[in-house]
Amino acid sequence: MTATDPAPLAEGPPAAGSPTGARTPAAGRGLGGPAVALLRNRRARAGLVLIALVALFCFAGPLFYRTDQVTVHLDLAELPPGGGHPLGTDANGYDVLGRLMAGGRSSLELGFAVAVATTVVGTLYGAFSGYVGGVTDSLMMRVVDTFLAVPGLVLLLIMVSMFSPSLGGIILLLSLLSWLSPARLVRGEVLTLRTREFVQAARMMGGTGPRVVLRHLVPNAAGVVIVSATFTVADSILMLSTLSFLGLGLPPPNADWGTMLTGGLDFLYDGYWWLVYPPAALLVLTVVAFNLLGDALHDALDVRLKRT
Amino acid sequence: MTAYLLRRTGQAVVVVIGVMVLTFALIHFEPGSAARATLGTRATAERIAVFNAANGLNRPLPAQFVTFVKQALQGDFGTSYSLHQPVSALIAQRLPRDALLLGLSILLALAVAVPMGVYQAVRRDSAADHVLTVVAFTLYSMPDFFFGLLLVALFSVQLHILPSQAPQAVSVGGILADPRGLVLPVVTLTLVSLAGFSRYVRSSAISTLAQDYVLVARAKGLAESQVLRRHVLRNSLLPVVTILGLTAPAIVTGAVIAESVFNYPGMGLLFYQAATSKDYPVLLASTLVVGVATVVGSLLADVAYGILDPRIRYDRD
Amino acid sequence: MPLLDVRHLTTRITTGRGTVRAVEDVSFTLEAGETLGLVGESGCGKSMTGLSLMGLLPPGGGIAPGSSVRLDGRELVGLPARELRRVRGNDIAMVFQDPMTSLDPTKTIGRQIAEPVLLHQRCSRAAARERAVEALGLVGLPQPRRRLDDYPHQLSGGQRQRALIAMALANEPRVLIADEPTTALDVTVQAQILALLASVRARLGMAMILITHDMGVTAGNIDRVYVMYAGRIAESAGTDRFFHDMRHPYSQRLLASVPRLDQDPLGELPTIPGLPPDLLDPPAGCRFAERCPYATQRCRTEEPVLRGEHGHKFACWHPVRGPVPVAAPRRAPADATAPGPGTATTGDEMSATLPAKRAVSARGPGQPARAGGPLPATTTAVERDEPAPAAGVPLLEARDLVREYPVRGARLPGRARRVVHAVSGVSFSLAQGETFGLVGESGCGKSTLGRLLVGLDRPDAGTVALDGTDLGSLRGRALRRRRRDLHMVFQDPFSSLDPRMRVGAILREPLQIHSVGTAGEQRARAAELMAEVGLPERGLDLFPHEFSGGQRQRIGLARALALTPRVIVADEPVSALDVSVRAQVLNLMKRLQAAHGLSYVVISHDLAVVRHLADRIGVMYLGRLVETGSAEDVCERPAHPYTAGLLAAVPVPDPAAERAKRGHAPSGEPPDPVAPPSGCRFRTRCPLAQARCADEEPAPRAFGPGHAAACHFPLRAPLPEQPDAAGVVPQVPTK
C-alpha cells in the first residue's frame, strides 16, 4: 500500500505500447537478478576479489615461482626472508612462499570438495525428508540431530586417531560431518515450499514426487544451498587447520596452512615471524573471503538461513 | 505447551539413544586397537587376547553395548586405560570446571553480542555496521588456537600481565581464587562465539524492525530507544534462544582447542588426551557426556523459548 | 481555522534505485467531526500521506521543504522529534491495516493499550490499566477486564482490530488516521468495525482520515473524498457530489470497474488499460494520461492543476461529467459497449497489441463453444476422447463431502482427538458451461472444498464425480487422465507460479506431465495460450516476477487452460489484485468461458465478484452449505438469515444505497470449527434463532426452482413440502 512496496506493478513485461516498455526488469528471482544484486554488494565484491587473488596465487603462482616442496634441506632451515627466499624457509628447509602456494592448493581443494560433496548429499537428504514428511522425516531428522549432538571435532578426533588419513580421507571425514547443516536447511526450506501454491499446482496437474522435488523444490531451495555451501568452504578450511594444530592434519610431505602455522607458532616467541604471520594472514583472509561472499549471497538470494 | 514439551522431550530421548549407539559403534569399529594402544604396538596376540577378555572386549558387540548402557545408567563408565582412575570420577572432577569456563564465556559473548547486533541492525549499512561486520567476520575466521596463542604472545609474553597457563586447581573455588589465569581462556572462547551470535542477533533484529507492530509502537509516540527496549529486543532475542542450543557443539569444539592451548584441565583436554592415547573408556564416556549435554542444552533452549513466547506458552494442549 | 490543515505536502523516499516521488503536492483540510477519505489503488501514495502526517516515514524518506501540516494552527513539519512524539498517539493516532501483525506478540493486550496512556499522561500504572479497560469497552470487546491479560494470538482477527482501535483511542486523539482498517477482515467484521469507527468518531468528536481502496467503503463512511493517483490528488469532492458528478476520468473508471452487488452483471466490466506509472520517474504532464482515453498532447506535456469550485476540485484538462451510465441490458453481448467519450472501453492492457483475440471472444456467453470449438487446430496433441455428457448427469457433482483434519499436536494421551470440521456434508452440482459461486467468511471451508474438488485433498466421506465417474475410485492412469479435465486457479499470483521457472516452462509443464505432444508442439501451445490470455509471446522467456499481479493471474489462467480442461476451480482469483486490474481478469475469465464452454467453480469471500461471474451461488457457513440458488435468487431473494446478513454487510459504491440499507450484518465472528455449535451452526449469530435451532439441525427446503436453504425460520415462505424432497433440492446436504 505504500510507495516503499517493491511495486510489482511497475515491473510489467516490455510490451509494445505499454508505459513500462522501456524499463529493464529489476533484480529479482530469475538468474540475472541475484547476480546483479550480488555484484552491487560491497561484501560480495570484496569476497570475490579476495578469493580470485588467493586462487591465482595458489594455482598460477607455482608456474612462475618454482620451489622444491618435497626434499628436506636441513642445511637451509629457518632462513630469514631475503636472498632466494622472499619469505624465508621453515624448519625443514622448505621455501615458505612456495609452501604457502602448495598449502593453499590443498586447503582450497579440500574446501571445495567438501562443499560439493556435502551440498549434494545434504540437499537430497533434506529434500527427500521434507517432501516425504511423517515418520520417515522424523526418523531422518533424529539421525541428523544425533550427529549434530556430538561435536564435529570430537567425532573427527576419534576417527582421525584411528585412521591417520590422507587428503582424500580428511575430505571424506569432513564431508561426513558437514552434510548435516545443509540437510536441515533444505528440509526446512522444503517444508515451507511444499505449502506454496506453485507446488500444489504441480501436484494437482498429476506431477510425480521426483518431478516436484527436482523441478520445483530443489531449484527453489538453491539459494539456501548455495549460501550454505559457501560457508562450508570456509568452515572446512578452518577445521583442517584445527586438526593440524592437534597434530592430526595432513601427513607430510603434504603442505597445508594449518600445519605451517602450528609449526611456526612453536617459534613465535623467538622472532621467527615469517613462519607465523604469512600462513595466518592467508588462512584468515581466505576464510573471511568465503564468509563475506556467503553473507552477501545470503542477502542477494534473500534466504533466511540459520547458521548452525 | 504440554504437547510441545512432550514432543521435544521425546525427540531428545531418541537423540540420546542415537548418540549412545553412534559413539559406541565408532569406538568399537576397530576391535584390537584398544589393546594395542594400552599394551604397545608390539604386544603379542596372546597378551591382546588376555587384555580383551579382562575388559570384556571379546564379547559380541551388542552384548557389550547392553553392558555399557546398563553401567552407564548407574554412572559406571569403567576405568581409564591410561590414567587408571574410574572414568566417572575423572568426569565428575572436570565437568564443573567446564561449566565455569563455558558458562562465563557464553554469558560474556551474549553480553557483547546482543547490544552489538541490535546496534548494527538499527544503524544498518552505516560505516559502523560495516566495520563491526568486518570485525565479526575476522574473529569468526581465525582458527581458535591461533587466536589463543596470539593472546598469549601479547598479554603473557610481551606485556607480562596475564599468565599463559590456566589455573590447575582441582575445585571451581580454587580456580576462582586465581581468576587471572582464567582471563585468557575465557576471552578466547568469548571472542570466538561472539561473531556468530552478533550476526544472528543482527539479522533477527533487522527482521523485527520491519514488523508492523514496531511501526505501531512509533505511532504511539514512543521514542526510538523505548521502541527498541520494549518491542524489538524481546522479539528479536526469542529466536536467539534456540540458536544457543544449536551452537553448543561449536562451543565444545572451541573448548577442546582452548583447553589444549591453555592447559585448562577440563573435559576438552581430557578428551583430547584420551583420543591421542586411545583411552576408549574415557573417549566413550566423555563423548557421551558431551552429546547428552548438547541434547539437554538444546532441549532447555526450546523449553525457554516456549516459556518466553506466549504463542507457545498459552497454546491449548 | 480547520483542525488539520495540510498544504503542499510532498514526500520523497530515496531508495537504492532512485528517489520515489511518493506524495506530490497534496493539500486538504479536515474539520473536527469530519471523515475524510483518501481513496486510490496500491502505490498511489495514500498510505504514505497518512504516514507523512505522523512523521513516520520509512528510512530514506523525507518531507520536502514547502510542505505544511498544521494541527490547530501548530506547524508539525520540522518540529523537533521530541515535540512530534508528543503529538503521535496523543493528538493524532493511527490504525493500521493488518491486525494480525500490528500487535506485539509477546505483550498482553492490556499493556499495549496502556502504553500510550502512560507515555502521554501523568498517571499511575493502575490508572492506565483502568483507561485500557474503558478503551476496550468503548470498542465493544466483551468482558474487557478479562481480555486485558490476553496475548494477541488469543484473540480473533476482528477482536485484534478492535484492540488496535482501542489503543489508538486510549488518549482520545483529535485526529484518527485509519489506513485500510478493514481490508484484512471478513466482510461481516468489516461492517462491524466501520460502524464502530463511525460511532466512536461521533462520540469523541474526532476527525478521521479513512484510507481505502474500496469504493463501497468510501460511499458509506466518508464525508469528503480525495481520489489519489500516482502520488497526487486527482479529484476531491463531497461524497454525494463525487459519486454523482465525478469529473476526473480516473475516478470515473475506477468506480465503473468495480463489480456491483446491486446491479445485474453486465457483459464485461469497463477497465482501465495499462498500469500506474513508476514513481521513480513519473511522466511529465498528467500522470494518468497514458491510461486515459481522452488524453491529448496537452495532457502529456502540461501538468493539470487542481481546479474547480464549491469544494469540488479536479486535476484534468478534459474532465468528464459524472459516472459511466450503468443502464445496460442484462447479459449484453461482450462487445456491445462501444467505446466513446462518456462511456468506457472494454479494453485491457494488452488487447491493442493482440487483435486476433477479439474474434475468439466475440462469441456470446452461455453458448458452449466446446464441441469443435475454437480450440486451436495446431495442437493436434491435445485432442482426446471426449465422452459425450449423458443427459441428466451433471458435469461435476459433489455429494455429501466431509473433510475433517486433526488439530496439530493434539495427539496427547488421554485426550480426545480434536478435529477441525472444515467441510461437513456438502453437495452440489455443476452443469456444462455453468459457473457456480461459493461464498462465505474465512474459515467456512470453501477453500477446503475447492481442494477436494480438484483432488489436492481427499474427502473423509462423500464423492466428487466428473461425468458420473467417482474420482475417488480412480487410480493411476485413469485418475491422471481425469485430472486433465479439472484445473485450479489459485489466489496468490505471487506464489502460484514457480519463481525459478520461465513462463514458457510453466505453461509447458502440464503438457509435459501428461506427455502431450512433442517439444515443438508444446512450445506452440504455450505461445497460443499466451495469446489467449492477452499477453505477448515474448513473455514466455521471462520469469514470473517480471510481470504485474494481474498479468501473473493471466498466466495462472493460461496454465489452467493448457490441457483444455472442462472445469476450472478458481479460489479467490482476483482478491489479491487492484480494482482496475481485477476487472481485466474478471473479463478475461468470462471471455475464456464463452470461448471454450468452460465450467467454473468460483470461490470468493467477495459476494460482488461471485455475483458478477456466477450463474448459481452457494453460501457456506462453518463447513455447511446453507443456501443455494440462482445468483439472482440468492442476491435478491435470500431465504437464509446468514445470506441476508452477508448481503447487508457488503458495502455498495453508492451513497444513497448505503444510507437506505436495510438489514444488519451478522454480529460477532464465526465460532471455532473445532467445536461447531449444535443444530444450526449459524444459530449463535442469528437474530432469529430460537431453542429449536440448537436442538435440531435444519433440513434444506425449497424456495423456488433450484433455490434451497437450510433454516428453521427462513426469511421467506418455502414451497410446500413435496413427497420427493430430494428431487426438488438435489444440491443441498441431506445429512
Image (cartoon, coloured by chain):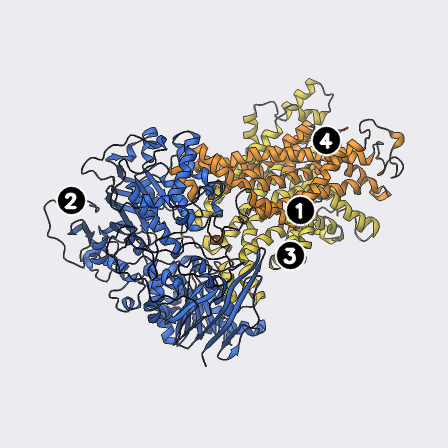
Which chain is rendered yellow in the image? Answer: B
Q: Circle 1 sits on which residue?
A: A45
* Residue found 26% across the figure and 38% down from its top: C463
Q: CA distance from mark 1 to mark 3?
A: 25 Å
User: Dots 1 and 3: beta carbons under 8 Å?
Assistant: no
Q: Circle 3 sits on which residue?
A: B116
Q: Circle 4 sits on which residue?
A: A250
Q: CA distance from mark 1 to mark 4?
A: 32 Å
- The one of A46 and A171 positioned closer to us in this rendering: A46
Query: In this image, B132 relative to C369: left or right?
Result: right
The type of residue carrying mark 4 is: Leu
Question: Tag 4, which chain?
Answer: A
For the residue labelled by badge 4, is the local secondary structure a helix, a strand or a loop?
Answer: loop
Q: Nearer the viewer, mark 4 or mark 2?
A: 2
The type of residue carrying mark 2 is: Ala
* Residue found 76% across the figure and 35% down from its top: A259
Question: Tag 1, which chain?
Answer: A
Q: CA distance from mark 4 to mark 2?
A: 83 Å
Q: Nearer the viewer, mark 3 or mark 2?
A: 2
- Chain A drawn colour: orange
Rendered location of residue B43, percent (x, y): 72, 21
